[in-house]
Image (cartoon, grey):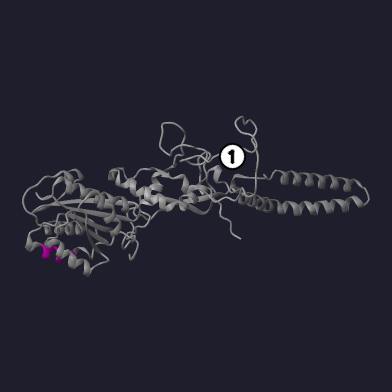
Amino acid sequence: MQQIIDRRLAGKNKSIGNRERFLRRHKAQIREAVKRAVAGRGIREIAQGEDIHIPRRDLSEPVFGHGQGGRREMVHPGNKDFVRGDRIERPKGGGAGSGGAGQAGDGGDGEDDFVFHLTKEEFMQVFFDDLALPRLTRTTLADTPEYKTHRAGLSSDGTPNNLHIVRSLRGAIGRRIALGSESRRQLAYLEELLAAVREEAATQSRREQIAALERDIEALHAHILHIPYLDPIDLRYRSRVRTPVPTARAVMFCLMDVSGSMDEARKDLAKRFFILLYLFLTRHYERIDLVFIRHHTQAQEVDEDAFFQAKETGGTVVSSALVLMEQIIRARYPSGEWNIYGAQASDGDNWHNDSPHCRELLARDILPLCRYFAYIQVVEQEQNLWHEYALLAEEAPEAFAMRKASTVDQIYPVFRELFSKEGRSK
């Protein structure tokens, strides 16, 4: 029979088990509350807790009771207005006992919704509950800055809190037996000899022999008693060794068009999508690198501030960003050691002759190296780049996906659609 004991620490007057059952019971309402919270907060505020309101009517439980059937005639104590036999009219317009017209007023007490606080971890769990990371693989081992200790037998050195009492006492008993066995055998022999000598006739020589035997016996007793009960060489300590913990690592490439057609509103949409993807990846990988590539007619790798704040004019050549992405992967992020994810945001505008080249670059050079590549278009109008990418999405549905999001409230639904668990192979 196996017993499982929950030893997680709980705060004062809190029950982890009851809270988890409550969250499971009202999961649908909590999920709706989280969606409303996401719509009303910025992406940078996503990783926070939230106060959840649940109507009291949804918390009610069925009860059993006796109905008021039969005939009942009574006048309660303290009544000064009615006597037995008076007929009392029902209250008009309101509920039982109200007598009002059912309109709101500035007095009285009402029932508030039940409010409880979702922690940051619980909020993010609901936030990403039905999402899955496509083609999730822990590729090789990264550099291992974390270590885990585990038992590795016993050693003769250690700290008192690691002392193994049973093994120490077992060694002490064995040492005392080994050191005192010969003395005990000699002691037994001398005691038998002394008893035999004492039975013989008492002569001067016998008395001297008895005295000598008694001295030898006393010396053996002293020797045995001087063997320590527990010696430092008997102590054994539990030995623990540190071993490196495998750490999977990923790199996220953010590609964005910063040409004149990408205004601040469109860049904000792209930024929200990138941050959502980054938060999602942090739930699966211990280490994540970010690479920001902006482009107009030429592409360059920049930091995050320059990536979102850049203002450029001129045309658009998307393939320049894809070429730079492949070069960075080959130089710094070998696909055998890194889980590579790409996210591209654009308004769909591109030099007409460049769009087929983009599809060819993705299919031939980039998708074989990536776990997943997502393209989001921040306008509804479809241009040549969208049509070329649509062909690629049909050819490689497991590694490439594309969606449109032209307003802020569409970002999260599009993100959930891209990373839905349904139909994903891991």
Q: Amino acid at mark 1?
A: Arg
Please identify the dominant SS of the magenta region. helix
Q: Is residue 156 left or right of residue 107?
A: right
Q: Nearer the viewer, residue 201 or 306?
A: 306
Disc 1 packing (10 Å; few <14; some 14–19; many ≥20): few
Residue 47 picture location, percent across and down = 34, 45
Q: Residue at x 49, y 41 (%)?
A: 95
Q: Nearer the viewer, residue 406 or 395?
A: 406
Residue 205 on the magenta segment: no
Q: Residue at x 31, y 62 (%)?
A: 134
Occupied quadrant, residue 140: bottom left
Occupied quadrant, residue 264: top left
Residue 361 seen in this snapshot = no
For the C terminus, the image quarter is bottom left
Residue 383 picture location, percent across and down = 12, 60
Q: Nearer the viewer, residue 343 or 242?
A: 343
Residue 282 picture location, percent across and down = 33, 51
Residue pointed to by mark 1? 87
Range drawn in magenta: 355-362
Q: Residue at x 9, y 53 (%)?
A: 298
Label 1's element? loop
Residue 284 picture location, percent across and down = 35, 55
Q: Is residue 105 above or below residue 116?
A: above
Q: Nearer the viewer, residue 155 or 344?
A: 344
